[in-house]
Amino acid sequence: MTKKVVLVQPNYKVKADAEIWTTNPPLGLLYLAAVLEKNKIPVKIIDANVENLSWRKAVSLIKKEKPDFVGFSIMTPAADWSAKVAKNLNSPIIKIAGGPHASALPKEILFSGYDLCIIGEGEETLLEIVQGKDRSIIKGIAYRKGRKVIINLPRTPLNPNKLPLPARHLIVKGGTDKPYLSAGTRYYPWAQILTSRGCPYNCYFCNKNIFGYQFRPRTPANVLREIDFLVKNYRVREIDFYDDSFNFDIKRAEKIMDLIIKRKYKLYLRFSNGIRADKVTGRLLRKMKKAGTDYIAYGIESGDERVLSMIPKAESLDQIRKAVKLTNKIGIPVTGFFILGLLGDTRESMQRTIDFAKSLPFDRIILNIAAPFPGTRMWRLIKEKKGKILIKKWQDFYNTSGKMVFTFPGMASPVEVEEMYRRAHRDFYFRPQYLLKNLPRLFSLSQLPIMYRGLKRIFFSLRTD
């Protein structure tokens, strides 16, 4: 008898007054679903995040489907919500946890209402579970035998070129319409894609438990197959490249742009997850501009060389300066991602970060306060070096952008970090020259959604409650 699977994107809006800046399509679940469908296994996706479902409503919807398996893709802020759902689903439903949080804490997860935990990439693993393979030989899972937790051998990273395209038909309008919102979204229909998996760098605040350190690119032809599909089937106007390291292979990145240019699609392209400043060339940027790129973000993190080297970002401030200035010169709007409260940050180093941001021609910056998520080296370092994590519930990791949630020896206090966070927004955005430069954007219809969300984010960052 054919088994039925329900995949759940948990609700991250765990507080009634919480602000949502993005509601990305659940790409991870869409890949899982595509593999299941390719193998003739019925699957349904419940996106509790975009639908803003309570855990009780999610339980009701899952039970209505009468699935044999239910899988959750869990990030830390939604761990409590997901556990409530899992605990209220009874046998014979098999409850499977996956995602960054589950991969980081499999032992804890298995005592939170789940039967199985998928560690790392889930496409092949979930298929083997649903097909009934003996769990003792399935790579990349953890499970319980009584009070004992068994963790099997890890699974070899898969080749993303062998995966089917994400099953976008399973979510509202393929995830291309307004309920889904990414940073800087301007044109609808839009889509988000991953052209590679894995990041070879070792930043301590990143969770590598899913895609790992090995850079695994899709071929340019494979990427264009997805873009062609999106244009022809969903008529997308805007594409957001969500890779961790899109331009790690510069030649591949150039080839993808060449193929888009050749298609003459008139697309708007964004790189909202950031690209590497040390892997940028004038040639690549010009191709990106010609292909339709109107948003590039750089993950800069700090304007202090010492703090940057501790991450370690493997980029210099000089490389970042050159990349930002070149991007601006070529005419592509540029955003800088910065983090305050990094390990070793002092009031002085954070001021250097603010000054660095002000010295470059950014169209905007996005500031966050560092947060030590489970599974990151930062989480382990804080525990090993006698720091303290101040969060009591997993849901408190939601929207920590303006709050310091840990202490660490030899660095600024939480009060100082939060003060510098507010100062950074004031100093950058309320400069007369910045306001004059961006005044025309306030009256641009295409920019109104971005300006509205940006102003709202700045307002919330300046609150002290």
Image: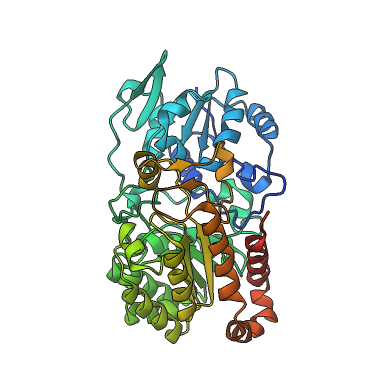
Q: Quadrant of residue 58?
A: top right
Q: Quadrant of residue 116?
A: top left
The residue at the point 47 percent across, 29 percent down is 109
Looking at the picture, how far across and down is residue 360, in whole percent? 45, 80
> In front here: 276 or 58?
276
Q: Is residue 303 visible?
A: yes
> In front here: 289 or 108?
108
The residue at the point 32 percent across, 64 percent down is 306
Number of residue marks: 0
Q: Quadrant of residue 455?
A: bottom right
Instruction: Please indicate whether residue 25 sits to the left or right of residue 132 in the image.
Output: right
Which color scheme is applied?
A: rainbow
Looking at the picture, how far across and down is residue 75, in whole percent? 50, 42
Instruction: Please indicate whether residue 80 sits to the left or right of residue 215 in the image.
Output: right
In this rendering, the answer to whether 145 lies above or below 247 is above
Looking at the picture, how far across and down is residue 153, in whole percent? 28, 30
Q: Is residue 9 visible?
A: no
The residue at the point 52 percent across, 70 percent down is 365
Looking at the picture, how far across and down is residue 122, in whole percent? 40, 38
In this rendering, the answer to whether 117 lies above or below 146 is below
> In front here: 309 or 207?
309
